Amino acid sequence: MSGKLFFFDLKNQYLQIRDEIESVLKHVCEDTAFSGGSYVAKFEKNFASFCGVNFAAGLNSGTSALHLSLLALGIKGGDEVIVPANTFIATAWAVSYVNAIPVFVDCSQDTWNIDPEKIEEKISSKTRAIIGVHLYGQPFDMDRVKSIAQKYNLYLIEDCAQSHGACYKGIRVGVFGEMGCFSFYPGKNLGAYGEAGAVITNNESYINRIKSLRNHGSIVRYYHDEVGFNMRMDGFQGAVLDIKLKYLDNWNNRRKQIARIYQKGITNTSIKMQYQPEWSESVYHLFVITVSKRDKLIEHLQKNNIFPGLHYPVPCHLQKAYSHLGYRTGDMPEAEYLSEHCLSLPMYPELTDDEVYRVIDLLNKWR
Ligand SMILES: *Cc1c(COP(=O)(O)O)cnc(C)c1O
C-alpha cells in the first residue's frame, strides 16, 4: 500500500517555494512591517489587479471580510440576509455579527450551490441583501441570483472564500456584487501562513469604510470616527500571499487537470459529482462527491490510506447555534441530503496523476 493521502496537504507546496518565502519573511522582520504596512499594501494592489477590480482591503480573516462588508452596506439589527444553507458557517456568522437574521435557502440538486428557484419565496419586507457563495470553487448562477437581487433592490455580496480565480462566463468572481469577500485561511486555494482575508470592490466609499473599520474606526491615527475593530492583515501574511499569488493560476490549472481526471476516471455509477454548468469555470477548492453508503466508503478509503473530508456534515440551518431560528429537518432537503452523503476526495495541486488514479481505482472497485 502507498503513502497516506488526505483531502488537502500543504507541506509539499511549502517545500517548493521555501527559499522565496523564508527570504521575504526575513525582509518583513528587517523592515519591521509587522501589522499592515508596505507588504500588505503591495499584496492588496496585486490581488485587486488579479481579480480585475480597483480596490482590495487586506484583513485578518475571511469571516471579518464578510462582517465588514455587511457593516459597510449598513446592514443592521432586524434586517434579513439570504444565505445558502450549504456553506461553511462563517457566511452566516457575519449576518449574526451585525444583529441581522440569516435566512437560509436550499441548494440546487445538481450544482450544490444556492438554488435561484428558492430565493424569492424567502424574501420579505426586511430582506436587505443576498450573500451568494461560490462553493467548492464553483461559481453560483450569477445572472439569475443577480436579477433577483435587482428586482427586489437587494445588495449582493459574493463569498469567494473557496473560489480565488474561478470564472463566471469568463470573468473572475468577486466583481459581480457590491463586494467580494475572500479568505486566505491556509487550506484555501490561495492560503496564508496564518489567518487572513480580504474584501475587493470597485466602490471607493465601501473600501474606505472597511479600511477604517479594520483599523479601530480610524483614518488619522488616534482620531476615531466610529467604533471599529482590530482586523488588519499582518505583514507576514501580506508578504507570503504576494509571493503565492504569482503561482495561483498554475496551481488552479493543476486542480482543474486533476478534476478532469476524476470526472473521466470515476465510472462507478453510485457516485455523483458536482454538475458543472457551461458558464462555470471552477477552481476546485474541494472535489466533493456523493454516494449512498457514504460512511462505508469512508471506512474503505481509510483502510487504504486515503482520508477524505466532509464539507459539510451539518447544514447551517440545523446547526445548534441557529436552533433559535426554528428550522427543522426536512426544511432544506438538498442541503440535508448532501450533508449525509458527501465526501471530499484528495484535491491539491501537488497530487500526482498516479495518486489520483489510486483514488479512482478504489472508488471504481467499490460496491
Ligand atoms: C473559509 C470560509 C470562510 C471563512 O474564512 P476564514 O478566513 O476562515 O474566517 C467563509 N466562507 C466560506 C465559504 C469559507 O469556506
Image (cartoon, grey):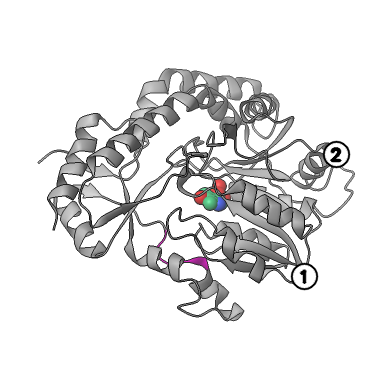
> Which quarter of the picture shows residue 357?
top left
- Residue 324, above or below 353: below
Q: Quadrant of the N terminus?
A: top left
At x 44%, y 66%, the residue is 334
Instruction: Name the residue carrying label 2.
Output: 219
Instruction: Bin the neighbour count of mark 1 within 10 Å (Cα to Cα): few under 14, some 14-19, many 20 and up.
Output: few
Relative height, residue 153 to residue 325 (above, below): above
2 vs 1, front mark: 1
Is residue 154 at all visible to an observer of this figure? no
Mark closer to the chain start, 2 or 1: 1
Identify the mark at residue 126; answer none if there is no mark.
Answer: 1
Amino acid at the residue labelled 1? Lys
Q: Secondary structure at mark 2?
A: loop
Q: Position of residue 296 (x, y in %)?
A: 19, 63
Q: Inspect this view and state whether residue 311 appears.
A: yes
Residue 154 image point, x, y percent? 76, 57
Magenta-colored span: 312-316
Query: Split into 4 quadrants, where in the image is the C terminus?
Result: bottom left
Q: Residue furthest left?
A: 1
Reply yes or no: does residue 315 show up in magenta.
yes
Looking at the image, which is closer to me, 21 or 210? 210
Q: Picture quarter containing residue 176? A: top right
Q: Nearer the viewer, residue 234 or 362?
A: 362
Is residue 86 a member of the stretch shown in magenta? no
* Residue at image coords 53%, 26%: 245
